[in-house]
Each structure stands twice: as structure tokens, then as C-alpha cells.
Image (tube, rainbow, N blue to C red):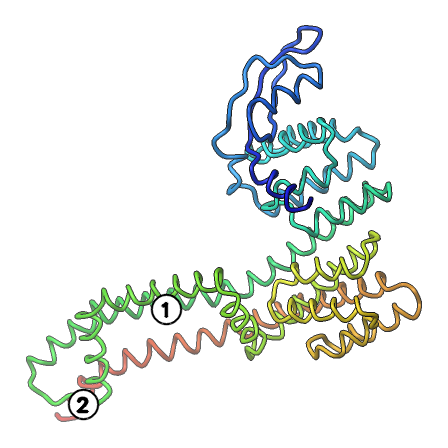
Amino acid sequence: MAVGKTAKQAAEIPFTWEGTDKLGRKMKGEMLAAGEAVVKQSLRRQGINATRVRKQGILARGRTISEKDIALFTRQLATMVKAGVPLLQSFDITARSHANPALQRLLGVIKADVESGTALNQAFRRHPKYFDGLYCNLVEAGEQAGILETVLERIATYKEKILAIKGKIKSALMYPAIVIVVAFIITAGIMLFVIPTFKTLYEGSGAELPALTALVIRISDAFVEWWWVIFGAAAAAVYAILTAFKRSKTFRARIDAWSLKLPIFGPLLQKATVSRWARTFASLFSAGVPMVEALESVAGAAGNSVFESATLKIRTDVATGASLTSSLQVTGVFPSMLIQMVAIGEESGALDAMVDKVADYYEREVDDAVAGISSLIEPLIMIVLGGLIGTIVIAMYLPIFKMGTAF
């Protein structure tokens, strides 16, 4: 049944429709269906006579919908549902409040599905690019327990905090990455255009060049002759690494494991991953999702292959009767603070609250780590860049100094 259902959902495509209701009022909307006949049949059940049904090219121009858009939509939907606004009306209000037409169309399709009798979590599951398994599992738990507004608030809070963590990590990594790229471009420019001028000058003098100057000139000659190979190889290497990271689980696992061992950024990435892991687990468990199912969703949301593999191992151990605390200890991946807090939570029956506190703690640790890295990396980069450019300048002026001392 599950396989057939998935195949059916995969075959569904977006349609726009226009028609009239029983009172003759003109109506229009969007719907996911396997074909035009299905759309007309579904509309007839709603008392709508379809006058025009047209297949859409791309559903909601999906590539323009960001995680921030989904987080904002979730927060708005949670607020309106909590205020007692009917679900379908909440979708209408939320869609109109967004300036992003792609999100408006997506919400229109979801609303049409819910209006035709589809459960909200199933309507979300039809768009896995925007609503992952974690999101849909939480919504399903909220629908079953009758606490949808509470669960939507938890999802919104979760997404906002995860986005904040991601933003801090990106800001910590972006600055040195940009500086390295700029340094490479500047150095290449010096090698291609500045050094050749000095080379022509020194060749005319006939004097013997210092070893450092000769080395820099040889590097410049290589740049001038093979610049297209150097730039092409650099671009190809970046493309190959990114492609392998996306497509190869083995390569991604190696990169993830290596990144956690970096001298400066490794501890930051580890704290961010633990924070995300704890926040995800606490959100699922507090919503009533069984622990084994929660761990499966947590593994996918960990954001690091090392923690993902460890979580799947924990899931297997817990499913066979082991405690969460002992399963965490066996992996050797998770920090002792998390393990101790989980042990207290299991003993006291407040596991979600304890893990949530761990997430808060490590989020503060990430803030402190980002601030520390920013204060450390700036002078370090200045020293490296100054040393690189200074070495090139000294190398080019050494022959002039040498000639000056000869007189």
C-alpha cells in the first residue's frame, strides 16, 4: 500500500482550473492530480462545474522558495490556527500576505488538497522539497493528538532556531572563504601582469638575480603560460568536490568526518550539529512521536554523516530494548553533557525538557564560538595575506637593493 501510494503521488502533476459553483459564481484554483479527468471529478464532488482545466509547467517555481519562506509561513499558520481561524481561511490569508508568488501558488495547491479531504500532513508530504519528513511527522502527530496549533508553533520555533544556527555557521565560514578567493585573484593578477614587467627590466640589466626573485619569476612564467590550465583546474576541482559531495555518500561521510577535526572550525561545527540534533529530537519527542520514529527523523536532520550514522545505530539499539543513554555512550560521538542530561531525563520522565536545555546550551556555545573565531580569523588572515604580498614585493625589489649596495 505504501509503495502504491508513493507511486501515485509521484505521478500527480499540478493543474489550474476555472469553473462555477451551484450558485453560478465563478471560481478558480489549483490542484494536484494524476490527470485532467481526476480534477474534474474532484471538482464535481465539491459542487463545482469545471469550465477550464489546464496543466501547469512547474509547480510553484519551486527553486525560488527558501527555508526562510517556509519558516515564516509556519509561524503565520500557527498564529492563525491558535487564534481560531479555520485552516482553509488561514491558508488564504497566509498566501495573500506573502510577496513571493511561488509560495502563493504552492500554498494554493496545498489548500486545494486539504479542501478535497486530504489530511494536512499528507498534503505537505506531496511537496518533500519544502516539507521534509520531520515537518510532516510533527504535523501528523499534532493532527492525531488534536494539538495542531501547538505543534505548528514548535515547528516554527524549531525552524527559526535552526536557520539562526545555519546563518551563524555561514557567517563564520564565508569571510575566510571570500578572503581566500580574493587573495588568489590578486596573486594571480600580480603574477600575470606585474611580475612580467619586472622580469623585462631585470633581463635588460644582465645582473644575476637573487634566488627568491628567480623563484617568483619562474612561478610568474608558469602563470603566464598555463593560466588557463590553472584557472580551469581550480574550477574543475571545486565542481568535482561539490558534485561528489552531493552524489557520493562515502565522499560526503569522509568530508563530514574530516570537517569535525579541523583545528578552528571543527569544534564549532560539532557544537552546531549537537544543537541541531538535540533541538530536533526534543521537538519530535515532545510532540508525542515514538522514540524510534523520532530517532529516524533526527538522523536525517542531523546535517552530518557521522552523527547520522551514529543516530541510526542508536535507533537500532533502542528498538531492541536498550536505553537511549547507553546507546548514546556506545557511539562515542556525542558529548558527555548531552549523555548526562539524557540520563537525567530518562530517570525523571522529562526527557524532552532536558534535551531541549542541551540545545539551548549548545546554541549559546555556537554564539560564543562564532564570536571567538571572528576575532581570531581576521588578524590571522591579515598576517597570511601580508606575508604573501610582502614576500612577492621583497622578491621583486631585492635586485634593486642589491644594485644599490654595489655603488
Q: Would residue 375 be found to the left or right of residue 125 on screen?
A: left
At 74% from the left and 70% from the top, the residue drawn is: 314
Q: Quadrant of residue 60?
A: top right
Quadrant position of the N terminus in the picture: top right
Residue in front for this viewpoint, 193 or 160: 160
Q: Find residue 51 and name its label.
A: none
Badge 2, how many Cα within 10 Å: few under 14, some, many 20+? some
Q: Secondary structure at mark 1?
A: helix
In the image, residue 304 above or below residue 73: below
x, y percent for residue 263:
56, 80
Q: Determine which residue is flagged by label 1.
A: 183
x, y percent for residue 167:
60, 57
Q: Secondary structure at mark 2?
A: helix
Residue in front for this viewpoint, 273 or 302: 302
Q: Would residue 127 be found to the left or right of residue 215 on screen?
A: right
x, y percent for residue 385:
39, 74
Q: Residue furthest right?
A: 348
Q: CA distance from mark 2 to mark 1?
A: 29 Å
Residue in front for this viewpoint, 185 or 389: 185
At 61% from the left and 61% from the top, the residue drawn is: 168
x, y percent for residue 43:
66, 19
Quadrant position of the C terminus in the picture: bottom left
Badge 1, how many Cα within 10 Å: few under 14, some, many 20+? some
Q: Earlier in the sequence, mark 2 or mark 1?
A: 1
| Residue type, mark 1 in image | Ala
Q: Determine which residue is flagged by label 2.
A: 402
At 65% from the left and 63% from the top, the residue drawn is: 302
Residue in front for this viewpoint, 356 or 60: 60
| Residue type, mark 2 in image | Lys
Tell whether label 1 touches label 2 (CB within 8 Å): no
Q: Quadrant of residue 221?
A: bottom left
